[in-house]
Amino acid sequence: MAEFGYEKLGVWKLGMDLVEAVYRVTRRFPRDEQFGLTSQLRRSAVSIPANIAEGYGRGSKASLANFCRIAQGSLFELRTELEVALRTEVASAEELKPLQGMAVELSRMLDGFIRSLKPDSTSENC
């Protein structure tokens, strides 16, 4: 399978790693959460790299920056849902800690990447 340009971006790669981690953890959630928190967490996680890819495909730095901001919003949504999972005891702090760490790192990376997309920068930095 041919590689697209967005697949080289660190923010996209970490976003995909986060998707995989969310799927692994949510497989252990109670069955009665399948259509609730499990589904919502997965949708939020998938939205992150999907928006980065879509923005890249639009062909302009402005579009990429905009879609990365949307990805950042999905990441904040995911972080909130992880907190809900913790507070409702659907998952333990030990299970969620790696996901929370990845989310914090990805948020920092997205912030930096968005800043790098100013007109005098190149989109291949991250």
Image: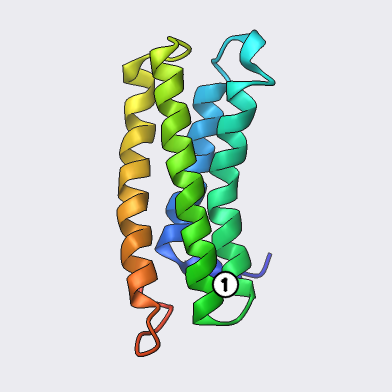
Q: Percent x, y for residue 34?
A: 66, 18
Q: Amino acid at mark 1?
A: Tyr
Residue at image position (43%, 27%) is 82
Eyeballing the image, is 8 above or below 85? below
Number of numbered markers: 1
| Residue wearing tag 1 | 56
Q: Percent x, y for residue 31?
A: 65, 10
Between 39 and 94, which is closer to the camera in this rendering?
Answer: 39
Q: Counting other residues with Cα less than 10 Å from the Cα at mark 1, is it few (<14), some (14-19), or many (20 or more)?
A: many
Between 108 and 4, which is closer to the camera in this rendering?
Answer: 108
Q: Is residue 126 at least partly visible in the picture?
A: no
Residue at image position (43%, 43%) is 76
Residue at image position (38%, 25%) is 96
Q: Percent x, y for residue 4?
A: 61, 71
Eyeballing the image, is 66 above or below 104? below
Coloring scheme used: rainbow
Residue at image position (39%, 34%) is 99
Under tag 1, what secondary structure?
helix
Which quadrant, please, contains the C terminus?
A: bottom left
Determine whether, in the image, residue 36 is placed left or right of residue 122: right
Q: Is residue 57 at least partly visible in the picture?
A: yes
Eyeballing the image, is 6 above or below 100? below
Between 16 and 51, which is closer to the camera in this rendering?
Answer: 51
**Where on the picture, by quarter, is residue 89?**
top left
**Where on the picture, by quarter, is residue 39?**
top right
Q: Percent x, y for residue 27?
A: 58, 21
Which quadrant, please, contains the N terminus?
A: bottom right
Eyeballing the image, is 35 above or below 68? above
